[in-house]
Amino acid sequence: MDKRAKIVLWAILVVIVGIVITEITRPRPINWNASYTSTDKIPYGCFVLYNELPSVFPTNEVVQVTENVYEKLIDLDTSETSSYMFINNFIYFDEQETNQLLDYVSAGNTVFIASSDFGGFLSDTLNIRVRSDYSVEELDTRLDFTHDTFQGESFDYSRGMLYTHFVSLDTLNSTILGHISYTKSNILDNKPDEDIRMPNFIKTDFGKGTFLLNTTPQAFTNYYMLEGNEDYVGHTYAYIPNTKVYWDEYKKAGRVVVTSPMRFVLTQIELKWAYYLAIIGLILFVLFRGKREQRIIPVIKPLENSSVEFARTVGSLYHQHKDYTDLVHKKLTYFLAYLRNRFYIDTQTINEKTIRELSAKSGKSLSETKELIEFILSLKKKTEHTEQDSITLNKKITQFKS
């Protein structure tokens, strides 16, 4: 690599490091997305509220639930009275979840839901309907309560409200606990603006328990909890019994669904930049260390073992010439040498003592050893041998060695 190329690479490296440092140190833009999760500190998260729950319910436990309603309630101990809390911009319960939720409330428990919609199954069962008005510009919204204790108190909101309210409810089982007031703009209809005041917070009895339904979930977020409207949340939670509280973290708009380790890494700013730096480091390593530092070592094939080929060649010669006597003599010579080297047997004089000693050292039976030795002696006495003698000798020797 010449000097000019190194200068270019160093310049690229400096630019990359500068970009990384700029991205890390620059102020992050405010995230106005709706989240409602207990861990999000963005304006429309619920970090502040969730961490204040132990002070609202000081004598009872607050349990975070990360599974769906059906799975949680089906395994829940119904002998213990508790409250279940849902906060999100939109909450939908399917038929199974709705039935399980209704059984839970009917048993004497409380469910608090803050949402702009409560889903078809639950709305039909409780006989409620909600509606959201929309305005060209964001106007001030005011929330208040109907209870005598809170008379005269109102809470103003100016951003992110959806002007959602109840338009129909079951008057036999429901009680209005609070209202939402706003000015409806009719610019598109060429009508004058009108002031609206409608219910946004109701209590609905079901069996032995109670549903507390609120149509302004934005009021429970970090933005308004830190803007002086925390008393609205405190007054709202005054209607929830001081029991064990289950905080839903499953039906959240900002719930992080991790399907792979890499997706989790890329959602965490620190891990994401560590991942990017690792990739940049590998690229630089390849650029600077990728060149070969020595020549490729040629592959030298090892010498081939020609013993097998030699044995085949010699065997083929004996087979062609049919010199079985010489072949038998060589087999006997090699086998007797094997006995001397392996078992230290004296093969000069072969007798009964030799057979017993060989049987004991080789682990073969006395009869098998005797049969082999007698066959060897018979072959040594013969002057000429046949092909069958050679085959039988080879089989007996192979069987003895196995």
Image (cartoon, rainbow, N blue to C red):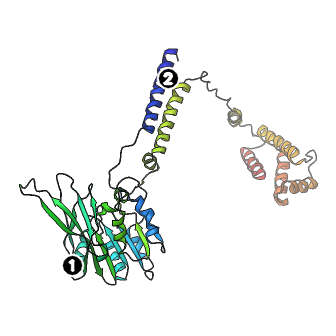
Vertical arrangement, residue 8 with respect to residue 316, above or below: above
Q: Examine the rendered structure and indicate whether residue 59 appears above or below residue 254.
A: below
Circle count: 2
Q: Residue at 78% of width from left, 50% of height from top? A: 401
Q: For mark 2, what is the residue? A: 10
- Residue at 17% x, 55% y is 135
Is 173 on the left or on the right of 268, as rendered? left
- The residue shown at (53%, 18%) is 1
Percent position of residue 331, x then y: 79, 42
* Amino acid identity at mark 1: Asp
Q: Residues within 10 Å of mark 2 (few under 14, many from 20)?
A: few
Asked whether 216 or 128 is in front, the reply is 216
Residue with the mark numbered 1? 170
Q: Residues within 10 Å of mark 1 (few under 14, many from 20)?
A: few
Toward the top, the furthest residue is 3
Q: Amino acid at mark 2?
A: Trp
Q: Earlier in the sequence, mark 2 or mark 1?
A: 2
In what element is the residue under mark 2? helix
- Tell me, yes or no, if residue 63 can be seen here: no
**Mark 2 to mark 1 CA distance (whole Å):** 73 Å
- The secondary element bearing badge 1 is classed as loop
Q: Is residue 270 left or right of residue 97?
A: right
Quadrant in the rendering for residue 327: top right
- Closer-to-camera residue (333/136): 136
Q: Residue at x 38, y 67 (%)?
A: 68
